[in-house]
Image (spheres, grey):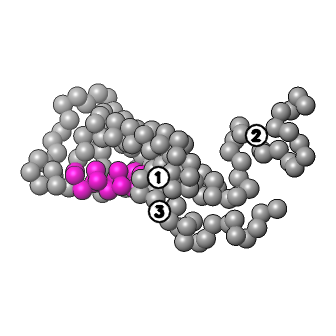
């Protein structure tokens, strides 16, 4: 049975959610799941920044043109905030021009927006997983629960 002292405090839950949003994977690292957190951190960062590299920062992060995708992109937290600030600073000196490689209405920017938006939507699941892993009764998928008192860990015995 789980005692109340094993349950995380409200402050720790909020901090885990905030860290998981700000830097995807950091909530897992804070909760003690370093390997999983590192994998998630690298995967979401690579997906988001690959999208930015494909479409360019100004064409990818556009809150007024693609507001629904922008909301999804903002779910990546610090990555989206950094890209948005970078795009705004570049807009003053480098105005966005018509893309030269337009093909039947589908641009590299569309692929970029999808990459970055999907990274944000995946981070919603990562935040939920980070919060679920804080439950002392949580057993990760594929892991064996610890043996009961009086049992050995080997199922063959």
> Residues under labels 2 and 3: Cα distance?
29 Å
N-term-proximal mark, 3 vs 1 = 3
Residue of label 2? 144
Query: Residue 105's quadrant in the figure?
Result: top left
Q: Quadrant of the C terminus?
A: top right
Query: Residue 3, image x and y in percent?
Result: 76, 67
Q: Residue at x 35, y 50 (%)?
A: 79
Q: Is residue 53 magenta?
A: no
Q: Is residue 77 magenta?
A: yes
Query: Residue 10, image x and y in percent?
Result: 59, 72
Q: Residue at x 18, y 39 (%)?
A: 98
Q: Residue at x 56, y 48 (%)?
A: 33
Q: Tell me the element at label 3.
A: helix
Q: Tell me the element at label 2.
A: loop
> Residues under labels 3 and 1: Cα distance?
9 Å
The crowd level at tag 1 (other Cα within 10 Å; few <14, some 14-19, many 20+) is: many
Q: Tell me the element at label 1.
A: helix
Relative to 139, is 34 on the left or the right?
left
Q: Nearer the viewer, residue 3 or 51?
A: 3
Q: Is most of the magenta stretch helix, strand or loop?
A: helix
Circle 2 or circle 3, nearest the eye:
2
Q: Quadrant of the N terminus?
A: bottom right
The crowd level at tag 3 (other Cα within 10 Å; few <14, some 14-19, many 20+) is: some
N-term-proximal mark, 2 vs 1 = 1
Magenta-tinted stretch:
73-87
Looking at the image, residue 141 lies above or below residue 66? above
Relative to 64, is 39 on the left or the right?
right
> Residues under labels 2 and 1: Cα distance?
25 Å
Residue of label 3? 18
Residue of label 1? 26
Q: Residue at x 32, y 56 (%)?
A: 81
């Amino acid at each position: 049975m789980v005692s109340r002292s094993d349950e995380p405090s409200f402050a720790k839950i909020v901090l885990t959610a905030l860290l998981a949003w700000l830097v995807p994977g950091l909530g897992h690292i804070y909760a003690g799941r370093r390997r999983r957190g590192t994998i998630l951190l690298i995967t979401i960062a690579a997906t988001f920044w690959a999208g930015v590299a494909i479409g360019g920062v100004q064409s990818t992060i556009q809150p007024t043109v693609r507001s629904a995708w922008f909301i999804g992109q903002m779910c990546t937290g610090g990555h989206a905030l950094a890209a948005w600030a970078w795009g705004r600073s570049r807009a003053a000196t480098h105005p966005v021009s018509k893309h030269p490689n337009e093909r039947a209405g589908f641009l590299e920017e569309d692929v970029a927006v999808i990459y970055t938006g999907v990274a944000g939507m995946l981070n919603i699941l990562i935040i939920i997983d980070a919060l679920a892993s804080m439950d002392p009764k949580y057993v990760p998928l594929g892991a064996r629960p610890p043996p009961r008192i009086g049992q050995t860990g080997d199922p063959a015995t």
